[in-house]
Amino acid sequence: MGSHIARRFAELGHEVFVIDNFTVGSPDNIKGIDYMSGDCAHLPDVHTAFRYFKPEVVYNLAAFAREGTSSLCPLTCIRNNIDIHANLVTEGIRSPNFEKIVYFSSEAVYGHGTPPFDETTPRKPCDPYGSAKAFCEEFTESMAQVHDFEYTIIRPHNVFGPGQSLRDRGRNVIAIFINQTMRGEPITVYGDGSSVRAFSYIDNSLPCYVNAIDGFHGRIFNVGDDEPVSVNHVAKVVGDAMDAQGFNRVPVIYLRDRPLEIETGFATTERQYELGYEKKVDFVAGVYKMAEWASKLGPHDWLNIPMELPIPSMPESWR
């Protein structure tokens, strides 16, 4: 998401500067854009970036976004969500040109509520990831009142498409299924596959992200698709799409649910049209586009991210 946003702003003539530790991203996604390899959870790195670039608007997409494992990696979750956002807001307030931050939160702030969630639904997170995102939203709201800067909060829904990391088996289910297929490994589904999500192809939601740069102060926007689908359906569509790219089909195996798994999660989408949401690509077409892109790259080795608090019931692939 960050690379798509950075490239679009560069195309529009904005000066763009990126800071990333490239744990899951790649400099290849931002060719031609000025960047710094650094860790936003490390305040001196953020200070260096702000002192060099003096941004007017900051987009924060940095996150530990592995919601399913956040209760097993609480320290990393807090560091790479709360610490990062606190550093960016603090350095923004200290920076001479800073006017606004656009914070990318998550529908995880809604927790186990009854969908569809709208932007006025109370925050009731049920896991460390959702709690961290909810805290960052509230932190932004309170700091803006005191220090007089603008903000817009985006709650994206399961964004996917070219450029997404294919090697993190803790997040981005479509990317996980694609890489499992390319590696000849079974597709792994947690639970019985009936859980429901709404997935948004990157080109559909990108206009919302870009348009949030100006105006919409103090507003929260759900941004995502209005077509909820089951994880079983995702597995089938990915299988069809990878078959079309010449990869052998792999079996689907079912594992026990992840800790604190949200069974059904999707949100209302009416407000996002104020930001310019355009449904250019439907879910199936988007998966086929992503499969075509991924097949040119080939299979990826999985990231090894150790669990801080392993439990006996967690999947073997998490060990």
Image: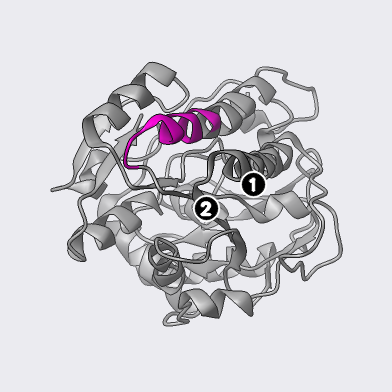
State the image coordinates of residue 221 (x, y, percent, origin top left). 60, 65
**Magenta-highlighted stretch: main secondary structure?**
helix
**Whether residue 109 is situated above or below residue 200 in the rendered picture:** above
Q: Is residue 72 above or below residue 102?
A: above
Magenta stretch contains residue 35: no
Inspect the image, locate mark 2, and give the three-letter code of the amino acid beneath it.
Tyr
Instruction: Provide the secondary structure element on which disc 2 rests.
Output: strand
Which residue lies under the disc numbered 2?
151
Element marked by disc 1 = helix
Tell me the magenta residue range. 86-97
Marks 1/2 in contact by CB < 8 Å: the verdict is: yes
Q: Position of residue 233 (x, y in %)?
A: 64, 70
Return the residue nearer the eye: 77 or 301: 77
> Residue 220 sits in which quadrant?
bottom right
Quadrant for the N terminus in the image: bottom left
Residue 87 is marked as none
Percent of width and height locating residue 232:
68, 65
Q: Residue at x 40, y 67 (%)?
A: 206
Please name the residue shown 52% across and 38% down the image: 63
Foreground of the two, 216 or 312: 216
Q: Quadrant of the C terminus?
A: top right
Q: Which residue is mark 1?
A: 141
Q: Is residue 67 left or right of residue 295?
A: right
Of 256 and 89, nearer the camera is 89
